[in-house]
């Protein structure tokens, strides 16, 4: 197995693996040539998983991971993001699923044990690729009062450093991938970019750090609104973005794409109990063949980069891992 020198985690909010009915699942209704190309023609739907809940292709592997975390109730963003970003079961730690923001009692855990912070503490470089309205813009104060997990992770690692200037210079990526919201809602004069341009920008950021995180939230947003055409459009934007990112990915990099809970894959009613995808490509992707829980993602990334945890930590192993 070729080991990676760097890793990029792309978080897609509210993406599960559900039944492939195009009447309500945009993964079955949308035109997603880049994702299907990575998956050897398979779609990101339950019917295309093998008996072990996987898709194994030449360029990528996908495992369907449990997001319920052995806790009753619908999975939620705050506890799910904590789990994904740390490897600790946020729902068990908190006593229930909670969202949409990270609950106050879990914030110290997330700050101390997230992927970016672990990289910094190991003497590695960490980057948060998202642009945030850090100053000089009428930002919604709720993003800091009721924070999402990725922002808290970046703050704890000293990586919440990209704003409008970096976005304008092509050194950051908007959470919505393209820059329309910065232009329309923040009055910023950042340039328009295509999803493909944003994917290449993210690849360039990842090439300069040991560990990089990028977070995208529109998938969850459109899932909650229940309109199939909007969900299809959102996924087609993600498809173009991920395709360009995969093409430009450094040869020594591991790319992992995952989520916190299901939603957009079934536009009929909000969050779901469906498993979430863990899509891995690049160096070290074989490590993710047997992932079956959100708690495994960050520990496997850390192990691939020789930052722990030890092999007996309850993480699934694959041949050569």
Image (cartoon, rainbow, N blue to C red):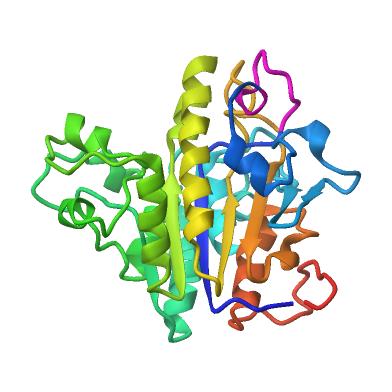
Q: Nearer the viewer, residue 5 or 266?
A: 5
Query: Residue at position x 44%, y 60% from top?
Result: 213
Residue projecting furthest to the left: 136
Q: Residue 194 location in percent, x, y?
A: 34, 40
Q: Residue 146 location in percent, x, y?
A: 35, 43
Residue 19 part of the magenta-drawn span: yes
- Span highlighted in magenta in the image: 18-28
Query: Residue at position x 39%, y 55% from top?
Result: 200
Please say if 74 is above or below 120. above
Helix, strand or loop for the magenta stretch, by majority: loop
Query: Residue at position x 26%, y 33% from top?
Result: 180
Image side of residue 3 versus residue 154, left or right: right
The answer to whether residue 99 of the structure is visible from this angle is no
Q: Nearer the viewer, residue 136 or 103?
A: 136
Q: Residue 258 location in percent, x, y?
A: 59, 49
Please say if 222 is above or below 68. above
Please say if 74 is above or below 317. above
Q: Residue 263 location in percent, x, y?
A: 59, 30
Image side of residue 74 versus residue 63, left or right: left
Q: How many marks can you see?
A: 0
Quarter of the image where the C terminus is located: bottom right
Residue projecting furthest to the bottom: 123
Q: Nearer the viewer, residue 277 or 205?
A: 205
The quarter of the displayed image where residue 50 is located: top right
Image side of residue 211 versus residue 3, left or right: left
Quarter of the image where the N terminus is located: bottom right
Residue projecting furthest to the right: 51
Residue 118 part of the magenta-drawn span: no
Query: Residue at position x 56%, y 63% from top?
Result: 86
The answer to whether residue 311 of the structure is visible from this angle is yes
Q: Nearer the viewer, residue 218 or 308?
A: 218
């Amino acid at each position: 197995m070729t080991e990676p020198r760097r890793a990029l985690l792309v978080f897609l909010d509210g993406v599960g693996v559900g039944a492939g009915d195009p009447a309500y699942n945009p993964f079955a209704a949308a035109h997603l040539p880049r994702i299907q190309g990575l998956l050897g023609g398979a779609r990101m739907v339950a019917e295309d998983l093998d008996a072990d809940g996987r898709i194994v292709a030449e360029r990528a592997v996908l495992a369907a991971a449990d997001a319920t975390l052995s806790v009753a109730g619908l999975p939620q963003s705050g506890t799910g993001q904590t789990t994904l970003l740390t490897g600790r079961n946020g729902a068990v730690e908190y006593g229930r699923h909670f969202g949409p923001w990270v609950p106050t009692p879990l914030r110290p855990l997330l700050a101390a044990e997230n992927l970016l912070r672990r990289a910094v503490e190991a003497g590695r470089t960490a980057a948060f690729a998202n642009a945030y309205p850090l100053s000089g813009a009428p930002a919604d104060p709720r993003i800091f009062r009721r924070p999402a997990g990725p922002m808290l992770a970046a703050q704890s690692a000293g990586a919440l450093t990209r704003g409008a200037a970096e976005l304008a210079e092509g050194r950051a990526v908007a959470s919505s991938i393209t820059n329309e919201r910065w232009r329309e809602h923040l009055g910023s004069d950042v340039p328009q970019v295509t999803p493909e341009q944003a994917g290449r920008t993210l690849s360039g950021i990842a090439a300069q750090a040991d560990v990089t995180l990028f977070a995208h939230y529109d998938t969850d947003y459109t899932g909650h609104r229940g309109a199939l055409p909007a969900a299809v459009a959102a996924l087609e934007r993600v498809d173009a973005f991920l395709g360009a990112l995969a093409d430009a990915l450094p040869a020594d990099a591991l790319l992992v794409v995952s989520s916190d809970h299901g939603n957009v894959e079934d536009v009929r009613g909000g969050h779901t109990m469906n498993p979430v995808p863990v899509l891995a490509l690049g160096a070290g992707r074989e490590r993710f063949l047997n992932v079956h829980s959100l708690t495994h993602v960050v520990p496997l990334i850390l192990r691939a980069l020789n930052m722990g945890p030890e092999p007996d930590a309850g993480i699934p192993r694959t041949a050569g891992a």
